[in-house]
Image (cartoon, coloured by chain):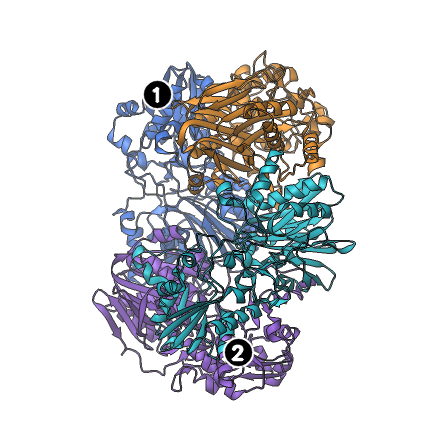
Chain colours: A orange, B cyan, C purple, D blue
Amino acid sequence: MQGMIHEECGVFGIWQETDSDLARLVYHGLTALQHRGQEAAGIAVNSDRIIRYHKGLGLVHEVFDDAELDKLGKGNIAVGHVRYSTSGSNSVMNSQPMVVKHVKGQLALCHNGNLTNSYELRRSLELSGCIFQTTSDTEVISYLITRNRLTTPSIEAAVGRTMDELKGAYSLVMTSPAKLIGCRDPYGLRPLCMGKTDEGAYVLASESCALDAVGAVLIRELEPGEIVIIDKDGVRSIKDHCAKKPHSLCVFEYIYFARPDSVIEGVSVHEARRRAGAFLAEEHPCDADMVMGVPDSGIDAAMGYAEATGIPYGMGLVKNKYIGRTFIAPDQDSRNKLVRLKLNTIDSAIKGKRIVLIDDSIVRGTTSARIVKLIRQAGAKEVHMRISAPPFLFPCYYGTDVDSKNSLIANGHSIEDIAKMIDVDSLGFLSVENALRLAGDNAEVCAACFNGDYPAGAPQVAEKERFE
Amino acid sequence: MQGMIHEECGVFGIWQETDSDLARLVYHGLTALQHRGQEAAGIAVNSDRIIRYHKGLGLVHEVFDDAELDKLGKGNIAVGHVRYSTSGSNSVMNSQPMVVKHVKGQLALCHNGNLTNSYELRRSLELSGCIFQTTSDTEVISYLITRNRLTTPSIEAAVGRTMDELKGAYSLVMTSPAKLIGCRDPYGLRPLCMGKTDEGAYVLASESCALDAVGAVLIRELEPGEIVIIDKDGVRSIKDHCAKKPHSLCVFEYIYFARPDSVIEGVSVHEARRRAGAFLAEEHPCDADMVMGVPDSGIDAAMGYAEATGIPYGMGLVKNKYIGRTFIAPDQDSRNKLVRLKLNTIDSAIKGKRIVLIDDSIVRGTTSARIVKLIRQAGAKEVHMRISAPPFLFPCYYGTDVDSKNSLIANGHSIEDIAKMIDVDSLGFLSVENALRLAGDNAEVCAACFNGDYPAGAPQVAEKERFE
Amino acid sequence: MQGMIHEECGVFGIWQETDSDLARLVYHGLTALQHRGQEAAGIAVNSDRIIRYHKGLGLVHEVFDDAELDKLGKGNIAVGHVRYSTSGSNSVMNSQPMVVKHVKGQLALCHNGNLTNSYELRRSLELSGCIFQTTSDTEVISYLITRNRLTTPSIEAAVGRTMDELKGAYSLVMTSPAKLIGCRDPYGLRPLCMGKTDEGAYVLASESCALDAVGAVLIRELEPGEIVIIDKDGVRSIKDHCAKKPHSLCVFEYIYFARPDSVIEGVSVHEARRRAGAFLAEEHPCDADMVMGVPDSGIDAAMGYAEATGIPYGMGLVKNKYIGRTFIAPDQDSRNKLVRLKLNTIDSAIKGKRIVLIDDSIVRGTTSARIVKLIRQAGAKEVHMRISAPPFLFPCYYGTDVDSKNSLIANGHSIEDIAKMIDVDSLGFLSVENALRLAGDNAEVCAACFNGDYPAGAPQVAEKERFE
Amino acid sequence: MQGMIHEECGVFGIWQETDSDLARLVYHGLTALQHRGQEAAGIAVNSDRIIRYHKGLGLVHEVFDDAELDKLGKGNIAVGHVRYSTSGSNSVMNSQPMVVKHVKGQLALCHNGNLTNSYELRRSLELSGCIFQTTSDTEVISYLITRNRLTTPSIEAAVGRTMDELKGAYSLVMTSPAKLIGCRDPYGLRPLCMGKTDEGAYVLASESCALDAVGAVLIRELEPGEIVIIDKDGVRSIKDHCAKKPHSLCVFEYIYFARPDSVIEGVSVHEARRRAGAFLAEEHPCDADMVMGVPDSGIDAAMGYAEATGIPYGMGLVKNKYIGRTFIAPDQDSRNKLVRLKLNTIDSAIKGKRIVLIDDSIVRGTTSARIVKLIRQAGAKEVHMRISAPPFLFPCYYGTDVDSKNSLIANGHSIEDIAKMIDVDSLGFLSVENALRLAGDNAEVCAACFNGDYPAGAPQVAEKERFE
C-alpha cells in the first residue's frame, strides 16, 4: 500500500520523581512513533505545575531543534504528540498537545482516535457558552474534562466522568498540574501501553517501540476503559467506571499502522504480519517461483507466505527513500515515463519468473496496476497478487482516514474485475475470518472497515460536512 | 526615546458590498499601523460566513507573502491586527485576530488595549467551565461576547452587554458572520476611527494613517463607548448603553505612539508634537545656538521649540535604519566603543554650539546619558535637554508597557539629580498641565502615567504576577 | 529621489597586531555602510594566513548571525563588503569578498567601483587560459593581481602593476596572507578612508561613518592612486607608481550616496547638502510659506534652502519605514488608491501654503509627479520643486547604475516640459557650476553624469551587452 | 554498516534535439542518485549556448522547488550533480556543476571521483597564473580542459588531452556550448553509463537506476578511457587516446555504494550482493537458526547466505527512517539507554535462536558491537557475524572517504580480537579472492582498500594536509 491510509496520531507521556531533561526523551519517543503521523508534532513539559510547550508542522526533527528543546526546560512530567492532519492553513492550531488553563491550573492533553459524537458534544458545549478555536476532538475533550473537574474531587474522576460522555475511539495521555494520566476508550480501539525505565520513570506510549527508544521496558497495555494515574504516590488504576465492553483493538494496527518491532496486546506486529502471509498461503495458494512484497509494508507478509508455501522469498522492488514530501511533477508529456522514481524493479531477480506479489491493501487500484506493470516489464512470466487484508468495504469512524470514497474499487467491483483492472494472473484477499485471527485465535479486534461491525457505534451524521 | 515604551496593538477592519481581495487591503492597512506593534501580525477574511485566517510572528511583510494572501481568498469583510507582545515560546497562540467558533457561527476579534479586571473575569469564566488557551485579554472578551450572544438578540447587543462587564481600555474590531463591528471603551482610552473609500467600502482603523494607506477618507472617530455596526444595511451606531464618561484618550498617542501624519480626535499628531515643543519653549527657555531632536520621535517637538524660540533648528544626529532586530553584540572589550552604531553625530553641525536637545521621554536615563556624551564628544559647548512629556511617575494599566520598574529615574530622583546623571547643563520636562493641553485647550485626555489619575480605575492586583 | 539610483558597494578592512574577534567589528562596520548596498554581504577573516569567509544575499544582519560570525573565528586581518547587485540566479557567486588561492597563498578582495576596460581585460585573460566563474570585475582584478604577483617581489608591487592595467573607478580593500592593503584609482572616483582605534587597530572604509561605528578615529582619505599597506611593520604608502591625475571624486557621493554623518575629503556630507540648498536658494529663489524635503535624501538640502531664504522649514511628508523589500501589490483596481503607503502627507502642515519641495533628483518623473499630487491633495496652494543636483544627461560608467535609459526625462524634455509633466508651479535644478562647488570652491569632483566630462574615460562598448 | 563510508558523487547529463523542460528530468535523475551524495545538489541547463544553473546544500528536493526549476528554463542539454562533501563554511562554492566562462564560451562540468595528482596539477596551474576559488578537483579539471581548448580544434580533443594529464579516478559529464560530453578515467574506476529515451534523448548517469527514473533504457557503460560526445550529429566515441589499461571498477560499488536495482558493467548490484552472501556461506558456514541482515545494506547478502545454506532468512532489525540528519543527543545520563532509536529488534523473531548476522563492513567496530548487544538482549542464543566484504586495510584515493584512520579496527586487530570486541560467537569476512569475483569470475575490479593494489597509483602526498 502506497501511503493511502493514515493513522491519525501517536501519543507519548513520561513521569519521573524529579525534574530532568524530559523534553529530549519525549523527542526520541515521538521519533519512534513518527510513522503514526508526519504532519505536526508537539511537546509539553510540566515543571512544578507550570507547563511549557511547543508545537509545529512537520516531522519531529523539523519542529524541534536543540534551541527549542532547551526552551522547554526541565520538568518531571512531559507529554508529546505526532499528528497526521488534513491540510489547512490553520493546522498549527489543530496540532497537539492542547494546553489549556482552567480553574484548577493547566492541562496538556494528547489524543489518538476519533469521536463519533463530537458534533453533538460540540453543539451542546457551544450552547452552554463554549467557544472553539480548533476543529479537533481534543478541544471537545479538554472542555469536558475541565468542566467535569468543577464538580468532581479529582482530575481522574473528571476523566472518568468524561469517558461516560465520549463515544468512539480514543487513547489519551495528559498532564495535570501534578499527575500523568492515560486512558483508553472502553473498547480499546486505539493502543496505549505503559513501561518503566531502570531509573523508575514511567512511560505511556501508543506503541512499545517508543518505550524501546527511551530505554523503558514494557509493563503492559492499558486495558480498555482503564484510567492510569501516575504521580509521586506511584501508579494507580481505575477500571470500574466503564461498563465491561468487548475488547476491540483496531486490526489495522497489526496489518499496517504499527511498526513491526512493536508488541501490541502481547502480540508481535511482525509476527501478526507473517501470520497474515501464512493465512494467505492457506487461502490462496499459488504455483510460483518467487514471493516478493511491496516495500515496506508488504515485506513481512511476503516472508510469511514464502515460509508457508516453500516458494523462495526474494526482493524485486527497491524504494527510493529520498523522495521529498512535495513531489515535483515532470511536464505532462514525460510523466508516464516516470513511474520508476519511487519504486524500481530489480530485473534480474524477476525475469522469467512466476511472481507472487504481496501488498497490504488495494485502495483505488491505480498504484497496484502501476506496480504490476513494472513487474511485467521486468520480465515476470506471471504475477499473482495477494493482499494481506480483506477488501475495504466500510468507512472507518475511529481515527483512520479510510473513508467510503477511497474504498471504491472493492465496493464496486468483484475480485475478478479488480484482477483484470490491475492486470494480475490471480488475486486473493485475506478473509475477514482470518483477519480476526491475526493477533491470535481468541483475539478481540475491530474489523469494521472489512465487516461493517462497529463496536463503538457510528456517528449520526458525517462530521466533515458539518465542521469544515 | 529609544524604543523603551511600546504601544501594544493596531487594529484594522474593512467591509464592502461584494467579495474582493480584501486581504491585500488589510495587509497595506496593517503596514501603515506597523509602528504600533512589530512582534506579530494576523489577518482574517470572511467570505459568506466562512472565516479564513493566518497569523504569525514578525513584521507584516514577514508574516505574509503573496502565497499566504492568496490562501486567504476573497471576502467582503476582513480584519487584521499588529501586536507588540511580550516574548514567550507560545506567543503565536497569543497573536490576533482570535478566531473562534461559537453557537452562532464564527467570530474573528482584534483588540487594542488592556483590561483592568481581566483576572476577575478569567476567574469567573473558569469557574463556569471556560478553558483558556492563551494569556490574552482577547480570549476573555471572546468568551464574554459569545456567551452574551446566547441570551441577546444580536451580536451588537452581546457586544454592548460585554462592554458593561469590561473595565479598562479597549478598542475592538471584529467580524461576525455578517457584520463588521467596532467599539471603543467608555473612556475612549485607545483610538479608533472610521473611513470610507470611493467605492463605498467602510474601514475601521486605530489611526487615520491606515485609512490614507488604503485610499479611504476619514469620516470620524468612534465616540467613547460607541459601537459601530457595518453590514449590507449600512452603518449603524449604538451609544446609549454606556453611562456618559469623561473622554480620556491616552495622551501618549500624541506624544509618542501615533504616526505624525495621523489625525486623532481632530488633532494632527504632528501639530500636537510641535505644540509640545512650543510649550517647552515657554516653560523652559534657553539661550542656545541650535535646537535638535533625537530621531525619530524628538524631531517634531524640536521644530516646535525652534519655531517658538527663534533658535535655528538643525540636524546633529543620524540614525542607522539598517540595524537588525537581533543586535549582535561585539565582544565585551570593545562594546563601549560601539555607541555610534545606531545613532551617530554630525560633528560639523554641532561643534562649538550650545545645543538644545529634545527627546520625548527619559525612562531609565542610560540612553539619554549616552546620547549626551556623543554630542559633547562632537564638540558641543553646552547641552540643554528638554523632554516633550512630563516625567513618568505612575504605571500604565491601559495597554502600554510603561510600568513602575522602568519609571525608576523620575521616581527616585529630582530633576537636578537626573540632569547630573545624564550630564546636561540644564534639563526641563513638559508640565502635566501643558501635557493635558497638547490636543487643544479643552481636550480630555488620560495622563495617568504622569499624574496618577486613572479614569477607568486600576486593577486590584498586578496581573503579570498571576498569569505568567 | 525614491531609490532609483544605486551606489554599487561599500568596502571595509581592519588590521590589528594580534588575533581577536574581528568578524564582529567588520559586521558593525558593514552595518554602517549598509546604505551603499543591500543585496549581498560578506566577511573574510585572516588568521595566520588562513582565510575563512562567509557571504550571502541580503542585509548584513540577514546574512550573519552569531553562529556564522563564530564560525569565522578570530584573526588579525579582516575585510568585508556590502553590495548592490543586479538580480540573477547566481548572484551569490558574484558577491564579495572574492577569496582565491594562488601560488603565494590566499587573497580576499573587496571592490567598489566599475572598470571601463573589463571586457578587454577579460578577453585577454581568457586567451591566456583564464576561466571566469562570475561576471564581476572583482574576478578580473583578482587574476591581474595574482598574475602580476608571479613576476613582482611583493603583493603591493603586484597591486601597483595591476593599477596600470585597470581603467575606470575602483577602491579596493584586500587581505594578502600577511597584509591589509587598500588602494584608490588614480582619479579617486570612489572614496576610501583610513582610521585608527585607541588600541592601535587600523581601519579602511568607504566612509568615515563606518570608522565611527567601530570606535576608530579618521586619519585621512587615501589619495587618488595611492596604495596603503598595513602590517606588523606599520603603515606604508606607495604613491609614485601612477602618473598624477586630476582628483575626481564622484560628486553624487555628496548629493545622495554617502551618509550625512560621513566626512569625505574633509567635507561633511551634511554640510555639502545644506550648501546645495543654499545654492538652490540663490539660483532659484521663490516666494513661499514653507520649505520641505522629500525624505530622507531631500531633508538636508531643504534645511539649507530654508536657512538661506528665511522661509520656514517644515515637515509635510512622512515615510513608512516598515515597507518590506518585496512589495505586495494590491489588485489592479485599487492600486491608484495606494500611493500613500510609502509616503504620506501631514495635511495640517501643508494646507493653504505655498510649498517649496526639495528632492535630490528627478529620474523618470513618475515618482515626483506622484508626490506633487499628494501635496496638492493635502491642500498646498502652490508647489515649487527644487532639485539639489543638475539634470542627469549622461550615463555613469564608474559604479552607479544611472544609465542612459533612466535619464530619459531630462534628456528629452526642457525644464518647462518637466515642470508641466510633474505638475509643479515652478521647477529649478542646481546648476552644474554649483554642483562642482558642493565640496568647496576648489574641490575637484567627477560630475560626468551631469556634464559628460569623463575623467577616466568611457568603455569602448557597452558592457552589459557582452557579458549578460 | 551505519553510514561510515561515503561515495562522493553522482553525475547526470541529458541531451535532446530541441529545448524542453530538462531541469525536471535532471531533478528526477539526481533523486535516483541521491544515495551517492546527500550534502549538495546542482543542475545546469544549456539553452542555445547560455548556461543557467543553481546549486545548494542539502538533498535534491531541499535545494530545488518548482520556482527554482522554472528559473532554470528550458534547454536541450542539461547536467546535474549530487555531492557528499566534507563540511566547511564555504561548501556551496565547492558544489557542482562548476560553471565557467572561457574563451570559447561556457562550460558546466560534473565530476565523480578523486585525482591523485591534483596537488601537482594545482601547483603547476598556479605557477602559470591560475587562481582557485574552491578546493575541488573539478576546478583543476575545468582549467585543464579550457586551457587545452586554446590549442586543440575541439572540446573533445581538449578533454582527451586533459585525460592524459589527470591521474586517479574520474567520471565526468559536461556541457559545452553545443555538446553533451561524458568520459571515464582509463581504469574505469567510477561507473558511468549511457541510455536513451523513446523520444530520442540521450542520458549519461552514474548508475542505471537514474536512467530508469527518467524513462531511459540502458544502452551500455562507457568504456574505461572513453569519451562520448552527443550533439545534433548523434553519438560519437573517442577511445584511442588513452593507452589500454586494466579495467578496474571500484568493487565497493557492488558491495555498498550502488543501488541494488542498478546494473553496472552488465552485472546486477543486487545479484552481486547475493553472490557475496553465497561466497560467505561457502567460506564461513555456520550452524544456525536464522540469517538476518543489518538494514539496509546487509539485506541482500543475508538473502544470499540464507539461500546458499538453507538456513531460514528472517527479519530481526527495524530501522527508523525518520531520524533527522541533525541528531539531537539526549543528556549524558540517559544516552546509553537510547541505542534503539535508529535500529530496534523484533524480539519474537530473535528469541532463543542462533543468529547469523550479515553486514557489509566493520569500520570502527562500535556500531557492530552495539547491534550485537541489541540482538543478545532480544534473546539470541548465539550471534555469528558475517561481513560481505574483506577487512579495510588500505586507504582509498579514488573518491570514497575510507581513510586510514577509520580502518583502525581491521588494521590493528586479528579477526579473533575483533570478534571478542564486538562480542560475537564467530566472525567471518569475505576473502579478497571472492571479493574480486563479485561481479563475475572474470571481472576486473579495483579492490585497493582491501589489497593495497592501486591500479591508478597513489598520491605522493596526502592532499588534505595541503589544501585544508
**In front of the other: label 2 or label 1?**
2
Q: Residue furthest top?
A: A442
- Crowd tier of the residue under label 1, counting other residues whose Cα lies within 10 Å: few below 14, some 14–19, many 20 or above: some
Task: Identify whether B35 is placed above or below D285.
Answer: below
Q: Position of residue D368 (x, y in %)?
A: 35, 27
Nearer to us in this view, D40 or C28: C28
Q: What chain does badge 2 belong to?
A: C
Q: Gap between marks 2 and 1, in whole Å?
A: 96 Å
Query: Which residue bears the numbered disc 1?
Result: D284
Q: Is residue A351 or residue B424 the one in the foreground?
A: B424
In this rendering, the count of numbered labels is: 2
Residue located 77% across and 56% down the image: B234
- Mark 2, residue position: C313
Horizontal arrangement in the rendering, residue C261 relative to residue C427 (left or right): left
The reply to whether residue A290 is in sight is no
Q: Callout 2: few (<14), some (14-19), or many (20+) C-alpha neighbours within 10 Å?
A: many
For label 1, the SS is loop
**Label disc, if present, on residue C19 of the rendered structure:** none
Q: What element does badge 2 sit on?
A: loop
Identify the amino acid type marked 1: His
User: Residue D352 in the image: x percent, y percent?
Assistant: 41, 13
Q: Chain of mark 1?
A: D
